[in-house]
Image (cartoon, grey):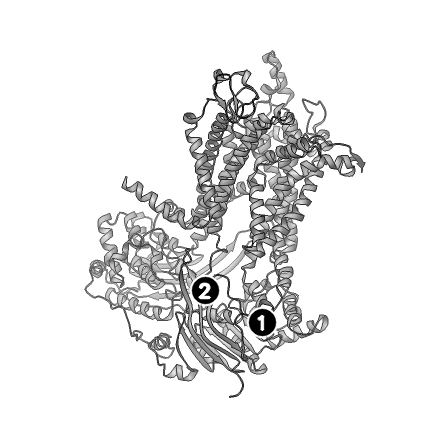
Amino acid sequence: MKILIYLINSLFNKVKPIFSGHYIAIAGLIGFSFFLLIALLAPWIAPQNPYDLMVLDIMDGLLPPLSKLGNGTTAWLGTDALGRDILSAVMYGLRLSLFVAFVAVAIGTTIGVILGLLAAVKGGWVETIIMRAVDLKVSFPGILLALMMLAIFGTGVDKIIYALIIGVWASKARLTRSQALSEMQKEYIDAARISGIPNWRIMVRFLLPNSIAPVLVMVPMALSGAIGAEATLSFLGVGVPITEPSLGLLIANGNDYILSGKWWISIIPGLVLVSLVLCINVVADRIREYNNPYLKSKDQ
Amino acid sequence: MIKYILKRFWQSGILAVIMSLIVFFGMYVVGDPVEMLSDEDWTEQDKIELAIELGLDKPVHEQYLSFAGDIVKGDFGISFVYNRPVLDLIVERLPATLEVALLAMIIGLCIGIPLGIYSGIKGNSRGTRIISFFTTIGYSTPNFWQAILLILVFAVFFQWLPASGRGDTNLLFGIEWSLLSVDGLKHMALPAINLAIYKICMQSRLARSGTQEILYQEYMTFARAKGISRNRIIRRHLLRNILIPIVTITGLEIGGLIAFSTVTETVFAWPGIGKLLLDSIHMVDRPVVVAYLILITLMFVFINFIVDVLYAFLDPRIRHQK
Amino acid sequence: MNNPPLLEINNLNVTYPNGSQGRDELKALDQIFLKLSEGQITGIVGESGAGKSTIGKAVLGLLDSPARLVSGEIRFLGNSLIGLSEAQFESLRGNQIGYIYQNPMTALNPVLTIGEQVIEAIEANTDMKGQSAQEYAIQLLERADVSFAKDRLQKYPHQLSGGLCQRIVFAIAIAAKPKLIIADEPTTALDVTVQKSVLQTLIKLSKEERIAIILITHDIGVISETCDYVYVLRHGKHVEQNATNNVLQKPEQDYTKSLMASVPLIDKRLHRFPLNEENSFDESSTGLNYLQEKQTIQESSNKPLLEVRNLSKIFVTPSSLLKSKQLFTAVKGVSFNVDRGETVGIVGESGSGKTTIGRMILGLEEITDGSVIYRGKNLKELVDAAEKRAHCLSMQCIFQDPYSSLNPRMTAGENITYGLRVHKMISPGKAKSLAQDLMALVGLPSKDAEKLPHAFSGGERQRIGIARALSYRPDFIFCDEPTSALDVSVQANLLNLLKDLQESLLLK
């Protein structure tokens, strides 16, 4: 318990100077926490379980916001063609979108960092192969690679996570490697080598803690990118399955009705999606700005 | 210089071969074409015959060689859905994609880069903050949702612009262009704006950080110490240096534009190659998907090569590399 | 004198915001005054962080945004320079006051040719245009001792050496015949071999044009060769001022004395540097006992501890398809011996391969040719892993840059003993007390072993580096410019420590 409080405290002290006085970034942080909370609590706070087709009534279909449903409850944000409550669908969609993005970014970043460190430490053909793969990936737009992956392996939540991981790892590997290489120029690595400390220990205790910071700075950006990419792929119908709609798929469902004036079905999930990405991006921007050496005061 | 170009050329070639390998293995080896092509009532014998017909009984490397050989000859096979040569399908849709991408590119460059340089120079002024407010919103909004909003506002609500299709086209050099007719331009407006918004945001952010980075270089302060006026420093020292990252970004973004045109074309029902790709994925029209990926890869490799060469022309440090 | 002095600075205060909060302020300049008359060469000397460069930037209105000119007076030919607009400064810069940067490679724009950059300065500050500006540029380069001036105009900065680039910067600075040039460490970034001649060019130009120079430097040798008058600065504060000879021969302040005394004199071999304040070396330290334990098991042989035979190193840039491999000989045929307890110096300018020799001895770099025989054995011939490790561990290194030689994510104590713990040569509990003992031995408070490296100054970090090297009880320590990154007064202190340690431990 004490350790937990200490950890939270030290985290707070680290985060405070980044955000203090930057109200837009603070608003972004609060907004993101709000969305995260909704996503976590969705099964308990949503009025309806949108995955349970039994509770849906086709008679409730396409109702505008604030309409009364057949069972007497109010659909605050309207319903879609199947009679699904948009509010509940958005909560569950948010949950799925965030889950997919978090998992993909976490795995992708880990893979990237490990490969980057390996490339830097091992050199030779290991480095060549890893870095050529990175070049290959980076010179190719992520969305096309993801489309290709999904075209080969089919769709599904797991498949889209794989596709997003492919989009995440390369830039992290490149950054980690260049960081690690510049750390390796430093003399404390030589000192460790003279002392006969094995390579993997140098990687874990010396290189990793000293080269991870810039990679972590990129994580929020990667997260918002992954959310956007998932939404796009699901919108195109190659992402999550129809039975488990994410925000992107909800928007796609509503797209068919937009020309007939039933705007709420796709606009509401879209607004949530944009707000979520925006919140993350302003936080990410602030973190990057804080870590940008050019914007900091230079010594003397 | 020539060595540098040759080296890049060689690397580009390798890149193309590797990508074709990946596409080949992805599409032919991981997926089972026989299962995809066969109907439910086919017998085992039918399936084996089909496999032989497709050359699947041969060793993998032979399959790859014949696959690559066909590509070199320009033979990408016949579409299952349209029952026509794939290359024809792609070539007749390519102009539609290119004209929108080009228009969006020009809009993006002309607006994005000046905005970025302005906000890089002005630092923390009000103008900068307004620009960064809009660009942040711009790149936080997924492309497809922007497209929906554009349709909702301009096509449904105001009814100023058409929401889908390509409109009238005129013939030039034997190719149909929407650029050349008023109706075509109207149809092009929304897709081009859709693609351009993202471009403007990206370009201006990149130009901004590039500008800031260069502003802090010592030679900028030294130029001031030489007594050169601020305007001249910006025109000469800043622009010449910032051109280097901008050319790189622009080149790479052409690829991004083509990639994102899959989304835009789908929403606006624009008959380009992006829509073709997506339709083909949905209808499991494998030859089209393969051909698209191969051609796009070749195009990227080519663009990257051109960017590298331009880069060498702009940066004397690379030009004089031995 | 009726005429106002060329430049007069009174009570100048400049602050930097300190820390991310921006609340604390660091006084970069604290009540600085300075007076300079025409044609005079004045030196400003002080260690890094003394605020020397800030003076130059303040005069030209080039202070970058976090720095703030709080108060004070700067007068140039009697006119105040405080609060001038950017346009007014523009007409002053280059025209009346020239500026020379420390590093010519970063001061010149990499994508513009030399010609473009010189002519640009000419056109901005004189009436010359086009052809005449071009001719004048050639003339300027020639006067700055740039050979083949006409060809050099077509070149880009990266195609020329640092010394040439600095001469070109001189040419730019004198283009409009300014009355004053501020030269900020003009030779520090250059190779030792060209420093002197580049400096001579600057002095020659100053004499020819009667240009006054403010020469900012940390190197008292440069001052003694060139300056008429000297100001000594420390931590942004004025320490002392006088004619150069007076300062050199009878410095008044203790700080100046230690600055002078710590410059090693060629003709006199010192046993120790005479210093006023010094961390005394504690003979009774427990750390010393730990280190002396092993001394008993030494073999008594009269063979040298280390024999270096015909050592060569050739770096190979790997070949690719279109590029044949390129060879670069860093070290060629070097031989020397080191006896037990002996100190051997390796001297040479940067790039001469000193560090490479050390790295080969320590096994950090492959040996191209020749052999290193240490304790009678060649590392290459050792097969037994334990023996190999012991062999390597008894050779240690003290590195050049204290700011990069410690792992920033480990405490000082962990840095010192991590290797011992990895090799299971010591228990965690003992490691802690050993780290504290060694800290005390090198003159640091033993409780500071818990702190992270960034809490220490450069000199203190170097002491931690020494403690780390000592923890393995080495027989041989390679010191790779252990003081070059430090301030002079700290340098002497550290060298004394090394000397003391060596005497009590009989190391190299």
A197 or C278, which is in the foreground?
A: C278
Q: Residue at x 43, y 52 (%)?
A: A183
User: Which quadrant is home to the N terminus of chain B?
Assistant: bottom right
Q: Is residue C168 above or below residue C387?
A: below
Dot 1, crowdedness within 10 Å: few (<14), some or many (≥20)? many
Q: Is residue C263 left or right of residue A245?
A: left
B315 or A73, which is in the foreground?
A: A73
Which element is circle 2 on?
A: loop
Q: Residue at x 59, y 38 (%)?
A: A141
Q: Are marks 2 and 1 on the same chain?
A: no
Q: Position of residue B171 (x, y in %)?
A: 80, 35
Question: Disc 2 sits on a residue from what chain?
Answer: A
Q: Position of residue C63 (x, y in %)?
A: 51, 66
Q: Is residue B321 left or right of residue C343?
A: right
Kindly identify which numbered label has been placed on residue A300. Answer: 2
Q: Position of residue B249 (x, y in %)?
A: 61, 47
For the residues labelled 2 and 1, the Cα–Cα distance comes to 21 Å
Q: Residue at x 48, y 34 (%)?
A: A101
Does residue A149 appear in this view?
no
Does residue C93 appear in this view?
yes
Question: Disc 1 sits on a residue from what chain?
Answer: C
Q: Position of residue C201 (x, y in %)?
A: 55, 77
Q: Which residue is mark 1?
A: C93
Q: Amino acid at mark 2?
A: Gln
Q: Quadrant of residue C245?
A: bottom left
User: Which quadrant is home to the C terminus of chain B?
Assistant: bottom right
Q: Amino acid at mark 1?
A: Arg
